[in-house]
Image (spheres, grey):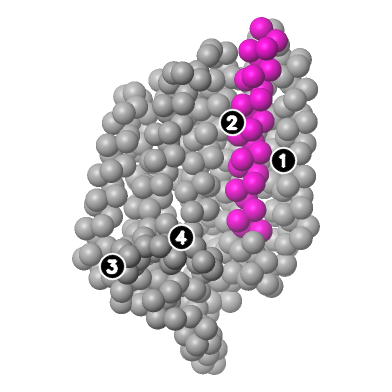
Amino acid sequence: MSDNKLQSKLLQTNDMVADDMVADAGQNNLVDRFAPPWAKPYLRLMRADRPIGTWLLFWPCAWSLSLAAVARGEAWLNGAFLFNLVLFFIGAFVMRGAGCVWNDITDRHIDARVARTRSRPIPSGQVSVRQALIFMAGLSFAGLLVLLQFNGFTIYLGFLSLLIVGFYPYMKRFTDWPQAVLGLAFGWGALMGWGSLYGGFGLPAILLYAGTISWIIGYDTIYAHQDREDDALIGMKSTALRFGEDSKKWLTLFFGATIFFLFAASISALYSHEAAFLVLSFLIVGLGLASGLLIWQVRTLDIDDPDNCLARFRHAHSFGAAIFFTFLVMWLLMRWGG
């Protein structure tokens, strides 16, 4: 019975999606509209047609870097801050792409059995495993060139993150918490941004990392609800399956932890600064507004509607931008107050 249900869903998806398109990509994306035919499968393989993942990998780096600037209280507009910010965005783009290629290589047999993912380049036969490995090597080399522009501590952290990235695709086979492992990997920038200015760890960065992990568990649980039925049929695990109908309660818990740790990280970074009262006031306002985004995300979520889940997942980008803006204004207020 399970195989019949799965086959029925695959046939429905095949009817709705053309052979050269990816089922979960947005309509009229730049890759589909402008990329040459030979490049489209590779750009889709690295998810260039779905840039949300690049932003979600970039935001923890940007948060950490801006919080480090707040803690240092130094002018950065013509210095290391902007240079590092650009490097982190480029790095997020190429390394998110490499990670997606690796994920699709390891999951190619699973993706072929899931309605939403069977049209991806590898399971659909548009790109071979050998071609994908070569492409991943090229992206990784580009990421290495970016990483080597940072200080030694940040380079070390960058290499260390590969251990988590390498194991992540296998986690849904063994644990109900693959989203937590993704949090460890995708939130790594919360440590790297701080390290790129300070050359080491700091309590604000560690607290920020904890908050980032909570945030990622939350938004990726929402994403996983799209595949809940297929995952159950083929024996894959996720927090979406584990939380089930209680997902909104769990999301409230994790998003609440996110705000708590972001606040704690900010207080730690602001310790002993003269302009702390003014900056603290804006921090409370900024986190309050960002909390409203998370509340809306949870309250309007319909875990039984894949389109709703995808839209709420993409909404995470707004929260990431809101936190970055909050930290930037905090720095500006410190400069003005000083």
Gap in angstroms between the C-alphas marked 4 and 1: 29 Å
Q: Earlier in the sequence, mark 3 or mark 1?
A: 3
Residue at the extreme front of the image, as rendered: 34
The residue under label 3 is 38
Q: Secondary structure at mark 3?
A: loop
Mark 2, Cα crowd under 10 Å, few <14 / some 14-19 / many 20+, is: many
Q: What secondary structure prevails in the magenta region?
A: helix
Disc 3 marks a residue whose amino acid type is Trp
Q: Residue at x 46, y 26 (%)?
A: 82
Question: Residue 159: percent from the left, percent from the top?
Answer: 32, 38
Question: Which residue is nearer to you in this view: 163 or 310?
Answer: 310
Give the residues in magenta.
312-338
Mark with earlier residue (4, 2): 4
N-terminal of the pair, mark 2 or mark 3, is: 3
Examine the rendering and report whether any part of residue 105 can be seen: no
Residue at 60 percent across and 48 percent down: it is: 317
**Which mark is nearer the camera, 2 or 3?**
3
- Please tell me which residue lies in front, 126 or 256: 126
Dot 2 amino acid type: Leu
Cα distance between the residues tagged 3 and 4 = 15 Å
Seen at 59% across and 69% down, the residue is 226
On whether residue 336 falls in the magenta region, the answer is: yes
Circle 1 Cα neighbour tier, 10 Å, few/some/many (<14 / 14–19 / ≥20):
some
Tell me, yes or no, whether the two marked residues, 4 and 1, touch with CB atoms within 8 Å.
no
The nearer-to-camera label among 4 and 2 is 4
Above or below, 17 against 222 in this view is below
Which label's residue is closer to the chain start, 3 or 4?
4
Q: Nearer the viewer, residue 285 or 213?
A: 285
SS for dot 4: helix
Q: Quadrant of the C terminus?
A: top right
Cα separation between marks 4 and 2: 37 Å
